[in-house]
Image: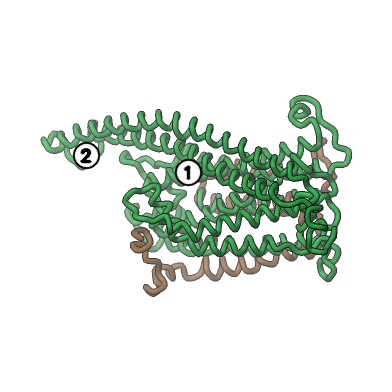
Chain colours: A green, B brown
């Protein structure tokens, strides 16, 4: 949407800078509590459990060396004690990873939010007002809506970012792993791309913020005559997105139908070709996550249980709830006779404007929770040996990562919607901003409806 | 049920939300009960996925109240989805390991780079 950016006072954009400050503060506090304080304690516990495991292992090795017990005897008391100590150590490690990764993800998410809303607010607050250069746009269009250059600039920024992505990944790896050599110059191209993206997005917001419902571009030809062009464009975009996710799903299915998995073994009465025994099983992500999966610990128990499936399960519910909260935000915006309800909801949402904002904040928080739990889950899988360096790991991380990226992009847009809801506000005349974003968000939910059972349960 | 219709004082969005939550619990539950045959779980996952997909597209995305061209726009790519799943996903699965080396991922290179 191209609107009349100069109709909004610069001071309103400065509120975006303040919002960025609040978000970053929350992120830093979250990181300090989860990623430093609690994770520090968990790390200490992990170290202790590691020593216990080393002791138990040494005791078992000594007994085997003295031929007191056989190395293959998995019912020996010392072997069981060693494996139990190992399981406890693994659990302590994963517990540490949970808090450390959650804290770090919270910090990185809030830095990303701050970069967009803070830089966007700062850049837009610095722009001259309408009166400073003669007309409202300076382009002769007056109040009429017209095409915006922001999407093209945005696409160019993505192109530049992706051009430098391989070097960017190596440089990021070098930050985390001192054995990886990288130069700062490797960040140059991709960071330039990121800056172009931020500038394009902030200009896009600058154009949309003053939009109060008049001047929406209408399609004039069949078959969408009379419909909003933005809405048609979004449906065409969703059409292309369906095909993108279908490529992931079909390639996964192709590989999956060839793999000898525990699931295939059990569902074919042991008759699956090339799948004669447990030794042939290929381990998929669901074998690490769901109860009764094929990944076993040293005692022969499946590592997948209620707790390993929990992050994916919570994420599924989080996306469904967030789909509902965005619907509530739209419904509230379109309601011309809105009245606060009684009880605690009335206190949380005393006015229509606050209600819309709070529903959007709830959606933002649920989406952020999704990203945090997703990365926690990934860290657990990697720690347990399910890395991207295998075919089954590759398709899992690419498919769920592409979905996570869509969630992240949605969160950046949602951040702006929260800002708009808190400043200009939404009502029945300009609610289409929420409606069209909602279509994208529901699509992300729809994609998860396919990904979750296919990659986590099957 | 139109957008404004209500049942037991709640609108269609609320009931759609409840149905989605229920079926999500149902599919997760189906996996936890290991005594259910795997082929039956397969069926449950597919049927529940279709119900949830319909609920999101028809009610949350308002396709039920949109004119036919929006529905056609949404349904059109599913032709390709079906073709991809049938033509790539479910046909000749041994093709993955049977691919010539020049188009097979080099995992050693990918992981060590």
- Total of numbered circles in the picture? 2
Give the residue furthest to the left.
Answer: A66
Circle 2 crowding by C-alpha within 10 Å: few under 14, some 14–19, many from 20: few
Q: Chain of mark 2?
A: A
Q: Do the residues bearing badges 1 and 2 touch, measured as CB atoms within 8 Å?
A: no
Q: Secondary structure at mark 2?
A: loop
Q: Residue at x 46, y 40 (%)?
A: A101
Height in image: A452 above or below A308?
Answer: below
Residue A73 is tagged as 2
Q: Looking at the image, which is closer to me, A256 or A133?
A: A133
The percent coordinates of residue A1 (x first, y second) are 76, 57
Is A407 above or below relative to A332? below
Q: Do circles 1 and 2 both sit on a common chain?
A: yes
* Residue A270 is at least partly visible in this image: no
User: Which of the chains bears the disc numbered 1?
Assistant: A
Q: Is residue A340 visible?
A: yes
Q: Nearer the viewer, residue A224 or A356?
A: A356
How far across and how far down the image is residue A417, in percent? 71, 46
**Residue A7 appears at what percent x and percent y?**
80, 50
| Mark 1 Cα-neighbour bin, 10 Å: few <14, some 14–19, many ≥20 | many
Q: Badge 1 is on which residue? A: A377
In the image, taking residue B16 as reference, residue A456 lies left or right, namely: left
Q: Which of the labelled discs sits on residue A130, or is there none?
A: none
């Amino acid at each position: 949407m191209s609107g009349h950016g100069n109709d909004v006072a610069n001071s309103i954009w400065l509120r975006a800078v303040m919002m960025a400050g609040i978000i970053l503060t929350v992120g830093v506090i979250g990181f300090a509590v989860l990623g430093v304080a609690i994770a520090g304690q968990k790390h200490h516990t992990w170290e202790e459990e590691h020593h216990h495991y080393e002791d138990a292992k040494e005791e078992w090795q000594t007994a085997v060396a003295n031929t007191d017990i056989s190395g293959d005897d998995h019912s020996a008391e010392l072997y069981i004690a060693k494996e139990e100590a190992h399981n406890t150590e693994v659990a302590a490690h994963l517990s540490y990873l949970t808090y450390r990764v959650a804290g770090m993800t919270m910090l990185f998410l809030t830095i990303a939010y701050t970069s967009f809303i803070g830089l966007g607010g700062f850049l837009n607050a610095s722009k001259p007002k309408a009166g400073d250069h003669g007309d409202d746009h300076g382009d002769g269009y007056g109040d009429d809506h017209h095409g915006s250059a922001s999407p093209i600039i945005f696409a160019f920024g993505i192109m530049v970012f992706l051009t430098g992505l391989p070097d960017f990944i190596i440089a990021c790896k070098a930050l985390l792993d001192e054995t990886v050599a990288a130069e700062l110059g490797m960040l140059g191209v991709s960071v330039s791309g990121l800056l172009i993206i931020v500038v394009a997005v902030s200009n896009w917001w600058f154009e949309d913020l003053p939009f109060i419902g008049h001047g929406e571009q209408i399609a004039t030809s069949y078959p969408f005559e009379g419909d909003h062009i933005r809405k048609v464009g979004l449906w065409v975009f969703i059409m292309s997105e369906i095909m993108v996710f279908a490529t992931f799903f079909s390639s996964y299915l192709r590989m999956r139908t060839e793999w000898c998995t525990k699931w295939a073994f059990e569902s074919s009465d042991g008759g699956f070709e090339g799948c004669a025994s447990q030794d042939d099983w290929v381990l998929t992500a669901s074998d690490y996550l769901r109860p009764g999966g094929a990944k076993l610990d040293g005692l022969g128990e499946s590592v997948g249980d209620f707790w390993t499936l929990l992050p994916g399960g919570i994420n599924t519910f989080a996306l469904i709830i967030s789909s509902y909260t965005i619907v509530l935000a739209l419904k509230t915006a379109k309601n011309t006779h809105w009245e606060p309800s009684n009880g605690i909801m009335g206190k949380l949402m005393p006015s229509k404007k606050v209600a819309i904002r709070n529903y959007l904040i709830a959606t933002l928080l649920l989406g952020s929770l999704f990203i945090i739990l997703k990365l926690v889950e990934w860290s657990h899988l990697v720690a347990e040996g399910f890395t991207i360096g295998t075919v089954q790991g590759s398709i899992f991380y690419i498919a769920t990562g592409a979905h996570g990226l869509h969630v992240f992009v949605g969160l950046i847009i949602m951040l702006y919607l929260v800002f708009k809801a808190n400043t200009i506000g939404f009502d029945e005349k300009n609610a289409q901003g929420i409606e069209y974003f909602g279509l994208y968000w529901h699509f992300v939910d729809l994609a998860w409806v396919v990904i979750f059972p296919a990659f986590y349960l099957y | 049920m139109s957008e404004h219709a209500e049942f037991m004082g709640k609108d269609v969005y609320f009931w759609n939300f409840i149905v989605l939550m229920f079926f999500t619990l149902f599919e997760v539950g189906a996996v936890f009960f290991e005594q259910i045959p795997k082929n039956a779980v397969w069926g449950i996952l597919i049927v529940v996925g279709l119900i949830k997909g319909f609920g999101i597209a028809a009610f949350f995305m308002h396709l039920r109240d949109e004119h036919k061209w929006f529905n056609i726009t949404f349904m059109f790519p599913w032709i390709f989805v079906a073709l991809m799943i049938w033509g790539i996903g479910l046909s000749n699965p041994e093709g993955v390991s049977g691919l010539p080396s020049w188009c097979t991922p080099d995992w050693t290179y990918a992981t060590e780079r």
